[in-house]
DNA sequence: GAGCATCGGGG
DNA sequence: GTGTACGATGCTC
């Protein structure tokens, strides 16, 4: 029969001595089905003479009493990093036979591709993309309870991905009287929140006044049963949670086992499979949104932690419901009537998890399409794996053999190798006017493709001795006549992105398009790192070195051209360059970019990033040289662009942040030193006379461990102790708010909770010397103000030290 | 400062 | 499951 469906996940099972690939998915009507296909496991051995083949064919090993032999052997030829190899493709009966048979022959022959997961191998070999609309011809067979199964006969896929999917977000609250330590074997689950498109509910087992979203059960066992029931009812395609691989689902699993309840969540009525690092449910795609966000968005998020509260704020602009979760156990035991707030908190967590999922799903989908692994894997692997599997997916068209992973010795060897990085032109501290910024669009990816940097064409004999191949490293060259496959697959990504980008200009609100562009950029930018990453299969030090060598070459070329044309270089780092016009026009800067682009290779492009009327570069430490990446610019609209200043750090008071930003604004926008001085003097005297409001002198610091574990008692630790004495929670992770109060003695003895300090009763001098002055000191240094200029009237303890 | 160990996320 | 993260930070010597 013919059938259309959307595959969600892939697994395999050995039935009657043969491995079967199981593709779980759902039809357009929403019925979960399982499509079954046969597939043979295999690996390769390099063949130097034919007698080896005969001995491999005859090989029999004893596997705990089971006679293990190879099923059959085929002879194939493949390319391998510029050479040709004759190989035996050794077919095995079962996936688990592969490592065993490989171990038996590895000392006699070189072996390859023996550690490729069976299901991944299937997807790559058959070129199947999960989540894509799939039409099959298949015969219905009976294999599992609870789900219809079909034996695959013919398969065809389209580009169109699954729409209208059912997503269920899950979040639990647990009884945790100890604070940081979780003991799932002992401590029960108190609440489970479930959130889907048309469904929101909090399950719990103590009664309190609440809204209609809360459903009360008789006890934890009941709660778990009801949870299982609802999952079955909703029958989601995706189940998601925040750190659900490491917390929510394993916790539910442990509690269910504790009560001897079988939670048959799977489409085939199987229980969840909780591994060490992930949890899977047959027929439901489990995505831990924390893992994906952390690995793929990573530091680009700009949030200091990956806590749900911080991540949701950055990505969604949404926060958790403000409740002190440390009080949950106590409230549960002693004042259950107050639990409604915790139910609200619980549901809000599930809701933001759901919203996060919706937000990042297009990125997951795009990676699934490009890289070709399952969404389960895609959402759990890092950059290097994404690049690696993208390459593996493309290899078929090059008939190229996959290199083995490095062994431990190779890894530690590679880890110790350092090579020259990017070029940095240190700025001279000062204020500059009429700045323009140029930067290279995707510098490293375009260098790789333009110079054919690829391990398979490294050091080819045909190009030996050719001049000007590498700007610095004569002994490293790449073929000029044959394109390497890594350069080739990367070029594919870059060109694909270039084709879509204009569309995004046309439809700027199309989030799917945006996700495609972002994902392609992410992948392209990861290639350079991949080539130099110690654990890569296609690790290539010569490639990585050549990339940075060309990077330095091109940026220096731009610097030379710019200074030859009368521009002054202020700062440059890796792929960007800051110049001053020095009386020339913006048009002449644009013209320069245009001229440089004429000389650059095809895909490389220098871009005119923008014009800034003024900018300030400061030095990090005392000394003549400027600091890397510490500058502030103001654009023509008067907007400040600040990089590297510590404004955003948490343990800085509002008054210090505000002072820094205002000083930068006055200096850059109004170009008025005197006004900046007047302004800062007013701030300092405001602090001295203690007219600055208390809210502006509150300092926020996060407690990182238990109070008793601190050897040195900083002001925030001292305040945490005071909180504890008052019965307020102050465990690891608590954000401590404090004000340094007036009086004599050391800082920590003066640190107080904000509510303990009456208006103006803070230590003005502390805020002058330890908060505001450090934030603006460097700026005034550049303006030429020294010593007491800022502090006429105020005491000078700080300035005397530093000026 | 190298080398090893733990942590992150979750209540 | 044809497997075992990874990078940053803190502690010890």
Image (spheres, coloured by chain):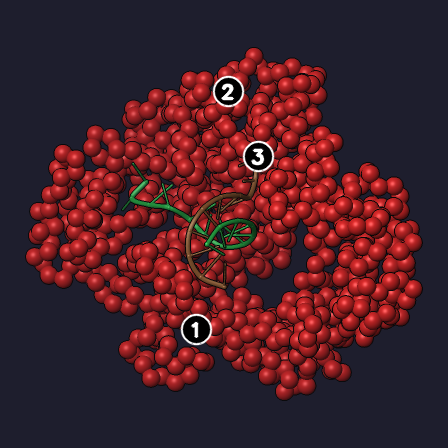
Chain colours: A red, B brown, C green
Quadrant where the N terminus of chain A lies?
top left
The quarter of the picture where residue A32 lies is: top left
- Give me the residue at 59% from left, 32% from top: A179
Sooner in the amino-acid sequence: mark 1 or mark 3: 3
Disc 3 and disc 2: Cα gap in Å? 24 Å
Pick whichever of labels 3 and 2 is earlier in the sequence. Answer: 3
Q: Quarter of the image holding residue A76?
A: bottom left
Q: CA distance from mark 1 to mark 2?
A: 58 Å
Chain containing the residue with disc 1: A
Q: Is residue A331 above or below residue A651?
A: above
The crowding category of the residue bearing disc 3, from other C-alpha atoms within 10 Å (few below 14, some 14 to 19, many at least 20), is: few
Which residue appears at 58% of the width and 22% of the height? A190
Q: Which residue is mark 2?
A: A224
Pointer 1 with pointer 3, Cβ within 8 A: no
Disc 2 chain ID: A
Of tags 3 and 2, the one toward the viewer is 3
In the rendered image, residues at marks 1 and 2 fall on the same chain: yes
Q: Position of residue A440 (x, y in %)?
A: 57, 70
> Residue A491: horizontal and vertical position, in percent?
44, 64
Give me the chain letter of mark 3: A
Tell me if A754 is positioned left or right of A29 in this view.
Answer: right
Residue A489, relative to residue A60: is it above or below?
below
Q: Are marks 1 and 2 in contact (CB under 8 Å)?
A: no
Q: Which mark is residue A701?
A: none
The residue identified by callout 1 is A546
């Amino acid at each position: 029969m013919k059938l259309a469906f959307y595959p969600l996940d892939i697994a395999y099972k050995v039935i009657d001595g043969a491995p079967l690939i199981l593709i779980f998915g759902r039809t357009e009507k929403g019925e979960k089905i399982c499509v079954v296909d046969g597939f043979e496991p295999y690996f390769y051995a390099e063949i130097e003479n034919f007698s080896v083949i005969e001995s491999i064919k005859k090989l029999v090993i004893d596997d705990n009493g089971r006679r293990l032999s190879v099923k059959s052997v085929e002879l194939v030829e493949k390319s391998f990093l510029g050479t040709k190899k004759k190989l035996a493709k050794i077919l095995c009966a079962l996936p688990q036979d592969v490592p065993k048979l490989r171990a038996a022959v590895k000392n006699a022959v070189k072996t390859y591709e023996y550690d490729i997961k069976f299901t991944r191998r299937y997807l790559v070999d058959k070129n199947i993309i999960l989540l894509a609309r799939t039409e099959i011809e298949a015969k219905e067979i009976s294999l599992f309870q609870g789900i219809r199964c079909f034996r695959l006969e013919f398969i065809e896929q389209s580009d169109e991905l699954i729409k209208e999917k059912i997503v269920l977000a899950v979040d639990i609250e647990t009884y945790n009287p100890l604070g940081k330590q979780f003991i799932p074997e002992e401590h029960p689950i108190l609440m489970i929140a479930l959130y889907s498109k048309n469904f929101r509910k909090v399950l719990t087992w103590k009664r309190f006044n609440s809204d209609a979203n809360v459903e009360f059960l008789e006890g934890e066992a009941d709660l778990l049963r009801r949870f299982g029931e609802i999952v079955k009812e909703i029958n989601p395609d995706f189940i998601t949670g925040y750190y659900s691989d490491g917390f929510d689902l394993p916790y539910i699993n442990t509690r269910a086992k504790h009560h001897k309840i079988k939670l048959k969540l799977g489409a085939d009525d199987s229980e969840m499979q909780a591994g060490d690092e992930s949890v899977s449910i047959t027929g439901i795609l489990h995505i831990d949104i924390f893992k994906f966000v952390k690995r793929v968005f990573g530091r680009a998020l700009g949030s200091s932690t990956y806590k749900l509260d911080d991540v949701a704020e950055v990505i969604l602009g949404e926060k958790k419901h403000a409740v002190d979760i440390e009080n949950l156990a106590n409230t549960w035991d002693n004042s259950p009537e107050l639990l409604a707030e915790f139910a609200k908190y619980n549901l809000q967590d599930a809701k933001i998890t759901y919203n996060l999922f919706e937000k990042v799903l297009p990125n997951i989908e795009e990676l699934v399409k490009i890289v070709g692994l399952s969404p389960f894997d895609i959402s759990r692997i890092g950059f290097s794996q994404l690049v690696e599997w993208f390459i593996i997916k493309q290899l078929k068209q090059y008939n190229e053999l996959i290199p083995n992973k490095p062994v431990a010795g190779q890894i530690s060897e590679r880890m110790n190798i350092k090579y020259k990085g990017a070029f940095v032109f240190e700025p001279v501290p000062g204020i500059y006017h009429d700045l323009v910024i140029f930067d290279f669009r995707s510098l490293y990816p375009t260098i790789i493709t333009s110079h054919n940097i690829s391990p398979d064409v490294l050091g080819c004999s045909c190009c030996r001795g050719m001049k000007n191949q590498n700007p610095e490293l004569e002994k490293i060259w790449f073929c000029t006549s044959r394109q390497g496959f890594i350069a080739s697959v990367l070029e594919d990504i870059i060109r694909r992105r270039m084709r879509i980008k204009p569309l995004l200009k046309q439809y700027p609100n199309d989030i799917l398009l945006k996700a495609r562009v972002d994902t392609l950029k992410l992948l392209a930018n990861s290639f350079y790192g991949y080539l130099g990453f110690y654990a890569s299969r296609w690790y290539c030090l010569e490639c990585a070195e050549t990339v940075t060598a060309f990077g330095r070459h091109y940026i220096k070329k731009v610097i030379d051209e710019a200074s030859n044309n009368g521009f002054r270089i202020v700062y440059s780092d890796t792929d960007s360059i800051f110049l001053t016009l020095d009386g020339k026009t913006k048009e002449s800067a644009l013209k320069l970019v245009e001229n440089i682009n004429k000389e650059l290779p095809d895909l490389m492009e220098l871009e005119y990033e923008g014009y800034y009327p003024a900018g300030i570069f400061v030095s990090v430490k005392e000394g003549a040289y400027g600091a890397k990446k510490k500058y502030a610019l103001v654009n023509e609209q008067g907007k400040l662009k600040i990089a590297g200043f510590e404004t955003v750090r948490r343990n800085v008071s509002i008054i210090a942040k505000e002072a820094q930003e205002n000083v930068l604004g006055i200096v850059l926008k109004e170009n008025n030193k005197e006004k900046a001085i007047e302004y800062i003097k007013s701030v300092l005297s405001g602090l001295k006379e203690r007219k600055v409001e208390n809210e502006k002198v509150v300092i926020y610091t996060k407690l990182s461990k238990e109070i008793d574990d601190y050897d040195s008692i900083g002001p925030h630790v001292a305040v945490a102790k005071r909180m504890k004495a008052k019965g307020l929670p102050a465990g690891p992770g608590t954000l401590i708010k404090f004000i340094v109060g007036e009086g004599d003695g050391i800082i920590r003895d003066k640190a107080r909770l904000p509510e303990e300090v009456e208006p103006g009763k803070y230590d003005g001098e502390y805020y002058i010397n330890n908060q505001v002055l450090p934030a603006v000191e460097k700026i005034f240094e550049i303006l030429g103000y020294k010593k007491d200029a800022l502090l006429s009237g105020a005491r000078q303890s700080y300035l005397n030290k530093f000026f």
